[in-house]
Image: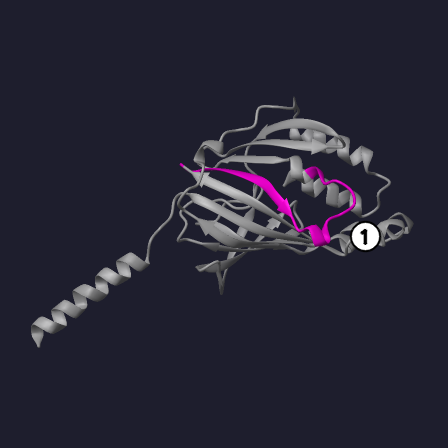
């Protein structure tokens, strides 16, 4: 009987070890949903275009990560909710070096391709006791603040060791698998995570585009969108993220 108990303990311990596997590289696909009508705000300009675009649009982005670095790229759109106009985000590239607190981003702004380099975004996070399962991973909720007043609600898992997430989001003790930013009327939720057969060679910083200081480009956008009403702020936030 004593021998059987010992065997059971060893077997259960082995099972627990196998079940708790920590990941430091892979590919995460996020489903991104934006409420276009709310993001456009109010006013005659917004009302003029609301009936020409879908209320909600869905797209898919992928984050490939390895060696504490990651690259976040557009993958595809849901054709049923596709906007009749193009989207600059489809041309964008987010490269993050989490260990060295550095990003290199290639962003299409008003038809111009810019190359931006700076330190990773500063986010003040506060942990909560709320949890959720996303794509098979146990996640804990954290609340962050961007741009002094924009709340970010994120769910991260410490089962993925990289402190990253979609776009330029980072800074939690694990990978961010779910995000909601109410004032941007947007959400990001991981729908799958792949480990095998991933092309890690794509994790390289972009090199094409006109080099520009992010702060200088922000000033340019503020001036160009000053008559856009509340949507002007949305454009600025998208640039910084």
Left or right: where does residue 56 sit relative to residue 47? left
- Residue 55 vs residue 129, the one in the foreground: 55
Left or right: 211 as drawn, with respect to 53: left
Whether the magenta-drawn stretch holds residue 92 is answered as no
Residue at the spot x=52%, y=46% of the render? 165
Q: Position of residue 192 (x, y in %)?
A: 49, 53
Q: Which residues are magenta?
A: 67-88
In which quadrant is the C terminus drawn? top right
Q: In which quarter of the view is residue 227 placed? A: top right
**Relative image position of residue 2 (x, y in whole percent):** 8, 74
Secondary structure of residue under mark 1? loop
Q: Is residue 84 magenta?
A: yes
Q: Is residue 213 above or below residue 163?
A: above
Above or below residue 73? Residue 145 is below
**For residue 146, above or below residue 182:** above
Q: Mark 1 packing: few (<14 Cα in 10 Å), some, or many (20+)?
A: some
- The residue tagged 1 is 41
Instruction: Report which quarter residue 35 is drawn in.
Output: bottom right
């Amino acid at each position: 009987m004593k021998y059987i108990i010992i065997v059971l303990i060893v077997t259960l311990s082995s099972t627990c070890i196998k079940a708790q596997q920590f990941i430091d590289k892979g590919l995460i696909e996020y489903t991104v949903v934006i409420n276009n009508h709310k993001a456009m705000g109010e006013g005659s300009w917004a009302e003029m275009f609301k009936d020409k675009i879908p209320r909600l649009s869905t797209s898919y982005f992928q984050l490939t990560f390895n060696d504490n670095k990651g690259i976040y790229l557009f993958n595809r759109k849901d054709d049923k909710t596709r906007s009749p106009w193009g989207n600059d985000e489809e041309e964008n590239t987010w490269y993050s070096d989490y260990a060295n607190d550095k990003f290199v981003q290639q962003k299409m702004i008003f038809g111009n391709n810019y190359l931006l380099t700076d330190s990773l975004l500063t986010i003040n996070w506060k942990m909560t006791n709320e949890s959720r399962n996303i794509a098979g991973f146990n996640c804990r909720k954290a609340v962050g603040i961007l741009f002094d007043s924009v709340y970010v609600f994120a769910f991260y898992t410490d089962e993925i060791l990289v402190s990253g997430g979609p776009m330029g989001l980072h800074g939690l003790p694990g990978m961010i698998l779910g995000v909601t930013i109410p004032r941007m009327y947007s959400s990001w939720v991981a729908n799958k995570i792949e480990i095998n057969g991933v092309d890690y060679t794509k994790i390289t910083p972009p090199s094409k585009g006109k080099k520009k200081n992010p702060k200088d480009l922000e000033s340019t956008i503020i001036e160009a969108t000053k008559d856009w009403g509340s949507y002007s702020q949305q454009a600025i936030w998208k640039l910084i993220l």
